[in-house]
Amino acid sequence: MNIEIPVERFAGIRTPFYYYDTNILRQTLDAINTEVKKHDNYFVHYAVKANANLKVLKIINEAGLGIDCVSGGEIEQVLKAGFSASKIVFAGVGKSDWEIELGLEKDIFCFNVESVPELENINDIAAKKGKVAPVCFRINPNVGAHTHANITTGLAENKFGIDMQDMERVIRLAQEMKNIRFKGLHFHIGSQILEMDDFIALAHRINDLQAQLEAVGIQFEIINVGGGLGIDYVDPLGNPIPNFKDYFSVYDKHLKLRPGQTVHFELGRAVVGQCGALITKVLYVKENAIKRFAIVDAGMTDLIRPALYDAHHHIINLTSTSPRAGQPSPNGQLPTVNSQLQYDVVGPICESSDVFDKDIPLPETHRGDLLAMLSAGAYGEIMASAYNCRRLPEGYTSEELK
Ligand SMILES: *Cc1c(COP(=O)(O)O)cnc(C)c1O
């Protein structure tokens, strides 16, 4: 099944907007559940920072996934969507007091703690509230990931987590704190990871750490391996569902568990990435001596990934009726590609980085055409900003637009 973009239903909807194909989302969730059901000790927490649209969240909740939050605002949002607090893991390198208080009041499943000062603060706040905080430590495993430098998180130089050499000392400290219960270890090495070898390296590192702790009598229940599974941005139409079978079997094969241990996953992008598209209208087409630009009404404020991570989103023209096979461009100078024309697709924001893609083939494109930027379900709508005093894009599901 491919993403379906029913352009005939878009009449009257203000562009740019996000469109979510709920069939793709549900099929993705089914594919996850098919793998997870093979293990009674695997739990997936959807990483809500990828997309916090309420309509999307409700579908993910219906599929039974837990949730991974990185802020108090996210905790509020997922509770509104109907998630049970008992399925919330709460990560983040800098949790504010009110966010910790909220987590304690709601009795969330676990705090993923990233430093000793944070641990001490959680202990203090929990003591004032008469609570005991369940805690996993986020360990920096110094495992690199083959992904963009801005989204690798598991190297010693990154700000995340606690160094491996401090792990034992920090666990001992936690075990002496009255209002902390040490539950396990947490990891997250980065995002948009497509090489299973990176996850295999993480599993082996976790095995080593577990053996090291076991040797000094430290045991625990929870191993949280984080998220990071990537999606196919190059061929989203050919490959709409990530390979969850290979992903989960990495941990099945390589992670050595002790009796009673549970394995937790925090997938974000892989859950929602392919179900979403950013729909934008072409405002103007202009040419100069070397370039043909399609200037669209979406900008980096609506989808920042290309500007921030050099990300590529496959762009299609939903409404052009004229492929003009083999014909020269209007001024007869610019090249054609695969009998299409070649465009830079750019936004209206006053920044040179406000470019979605360069020199891509599209059928001849006119003012008023609708374009879709595919694979935009993750880190799209949620990262929108009001820079240039722009309105935030709306998000619609296929179910609403019937
Ligand atoms: C962002 C994040 C995730 C999700 O990452 P994806 O690449 O979207 O799967 C999981 N865990 C933590 C701690 C994160 O910060």
Image (tube, rainbow, N blue to C red):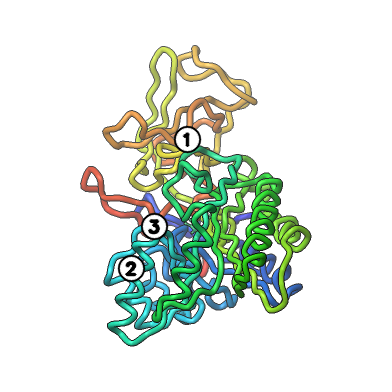
> Residue 93 — which label?
3
> Residue 161 — which label?
none
Q: Residues within 10 Å of mark 2 (few under 14, many from 20)?
A: few
x then y, percent, for residue 393: 35, 55
Instruction: Give whichever of discs 1 and 3 has the lower sequence position.
Output: 3
x then y, percent, for residue 395: 41, 60
Rounded to the nearest whole Å, what is the CA distance between mark 2 and mark 3? Answer: 15 Å
- Asked if residue 81 can be seen in this view, the reply is no
Rounded to the nearest whole Å, what is the CA distance between mark 1 and mark 3? Answer: 25 Å
- Residue nearest the viewer, comparing 59 with 172: 172
Residue topped by disc 2: 73
- Tag 2 near tag 1, CB within 8 Å: no
Q: Quadrant of residue 226?
A: bottom right
Instruction: Give whichever of discs 2 and 1 has the lower sequence position.
Output: 2
Q: Residues within 10 Å of mark 1 (few under 14, many from 20)?
A: some
Q: Quadrant of residue 100?
A: bottom left
Residue type at tag 2 = Gly
Say whether residue 155 is left or right of residue 81: right
Residue plotted at (34% across, 64% down): 95
Residue plotted at (44% across, 14% down): 290
- Does residue 242 sit above or below 217 in this rendering? above
x then y, percent, for residue 84: 47, 82
Instruction: Give whichever of discs 2 and 3 has the lower sequence position.
Output: 2
Residue plotted at (35% across, 51% down): 384
Q: Residue furthest front?
A: 216
Rounded to the nearest whole Å, what is the CA distance between mark 2 and mark 1? Answer: 28 Å
x then y, percent, for residue 92: 41, 60
Residue topped by disc 1: 310
